[in-house]
Every structure is written in structure tokens, then in C-alpha cells.
Amino acid sequence: MATLVGKQFPDITVKAIDEMGDAFQINVLDQAADNNKKVLLFWYPKDFTFVCPTEIHAFQEISAELEKRNTILIGASCDTAEVHFAWLNTAKENGGIEGVKFPLIADSTRVLAYELGILDYDMYDEEEEDMGGDNVPYRATYLIDEKGQVFHESVNHFPIGRNVQEYIRLIDAFTHVQTHGEVCPANWDEGKDAMDATRSGVAEYLSKN
């Protein structure tokens, strides 16, 4: 899988659903460029599973913080819109995602997930006529800037849930670079010193820290 960092997100339109059950077409690249907003797009393997609802609720909890940062939140899997809607109508205590407000992509044709290279499948076996694997997406996350360029991507294996706070830190860091032209060192958080991307700037930062 080639990295998308520094490149335009694929210009592919797919189906999505909102919390009201309304299905619509969505293009992630357009969401960023047309609205002059950043996008946090996260993929998860399957609806009605175990780690996935914990992540989805965690992303919902930071949705207001993302909105403050001019960032659109979108979830995605390869389940159908109908399965998404059933899960959205299942109570949290029963493993559902009732109360989630952001849209969920229903990439049931797998056209976008395949283009991103995040599907769990083996090479196609012509004799067996089988792709192998589960053919579902890994826990992939993309941060996309206002021009539709990816500035962060990460992929977790199925058992490993994400730390959603890290995406807020990454958005803050990238926004700081955009605003101030400074670079953000290791373990940088909003409010900490950044540094000039020069030898003297690095020396000055290290002498203080």
C-alpha cells in the first residue's frame, strides 16, 4: 500500500447514511475542498462487533472538539446503509451506536476501500474463485486538509482500538504549522513551544527543553 500522505485523497463518490436514516452520495475529497474544512475519516471492520462501537462512541465524544477545529468527522465500513441504520437504532447498552450524529459511509461495493488498499484479503485464487481473508477494512484513519490533501494516515489491525485524542493533537499540530510556519517537535501539544525549521531553531528549542 503506497502512502497517501502529501497526496490528494481519491476522488471517488460512495453511498453514506446519516443518523436519520437518509442515504446520500458523498465524496470525501469534495467534503474538504468544497467546504474549506479538514476531514477526519476513520474506517472500522464491521457493524455489530465489539471494538468498533467503543471507537465510534469515542469519536462521537470528540465531535464537538473537531467542529471547533473546522474538521468534518466521517466514519466508514463496507456494511450496507441498511445495516448501518439498524446499528444506529440499537441502544448503546446492547452494543449499538444510538446517539451517533456523524455520517457513516456504506462502501458495500468496496470501491473506495480497495482504492485505499485497506481491505483484509489474500491474493485472488482463480482455482478456488476466492479472495481469501474477510475482505473487510482495517482500522484505517485519514486526516485531510482543506485542499483535499492527506496529512496523516494510520492503519491498525482489527484487535487494536484507536486513541481518538491523538487525532486532535495531530490536527492542532498541523493547524499550527499552517498558521505559524513552525514545525512541531516530539510530544508537542497545543500551547507548547514549537520551533523554526532551521539549525539554529532546533538548537534553541533543545536548549530550552
Image: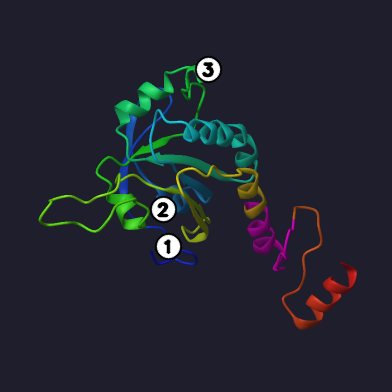
Q: Which mark is residue 138?
A: none
Given this view, does label 3 or label 1 mark the residue nearer the observer?
3
* Position of the C terminus by quadrant: bottom right
Say left or right for 91 vs 124: right
Q: Residue at x 75, y 54 (%)?
A: 189
Q: In the image, residue 169 lies at what x, y percent?
A: 67, 51
Is label 3 in a helix, a strand or a loop?
helix
Q: Is residue 136 above or below residue 193?
A: above
Q: Which residues are magenta?
A: 171-188
Q: Relative to the observer, which residue lies in front, 11 or 50? A: 50
Say left or right for 121 vs 88: left
Is label 1 in a helix, a strand or a loop?
loop
Can I make out residue 117 in this image?
yes
Q: Is residue 30 magenta?
A: no
Q: In the image, residue 204 lies at what x, y percent?
A: 86, 75
Q: How many marks?
A: 3
Q: Residue furthest right?
A: 208
Q: Residue at x 42, y 18 (%)?
A: 89
Q: Is residue 86 above or below residue 181?
A: above
Q: What residue would you read off at disc 3?
A: 93
Q: What residue would you read off at disc 2?
A: 29
Q: Residue at x 43, y 41 (%)?
A: 44
Q: Earlier in the sequence, mark 1 or mark 2?
A: 1
Q: What residue would you read off at disc 1?
A: 8
Q: Residues within 10 Å of mark 3 (few under 14, many from 20)?
A: few
Q: Residues within 10 Å of mark 2 (few under 14, many from 20)?
A: many
Between the residue at mark 2 and the residue at mark 3, the CA separation in whole angstroms equals 35 Å
Quadrant of residue 81 within the rendered picture: top left
- Which amino acid type is shown beneath numbered disc 1? Gln
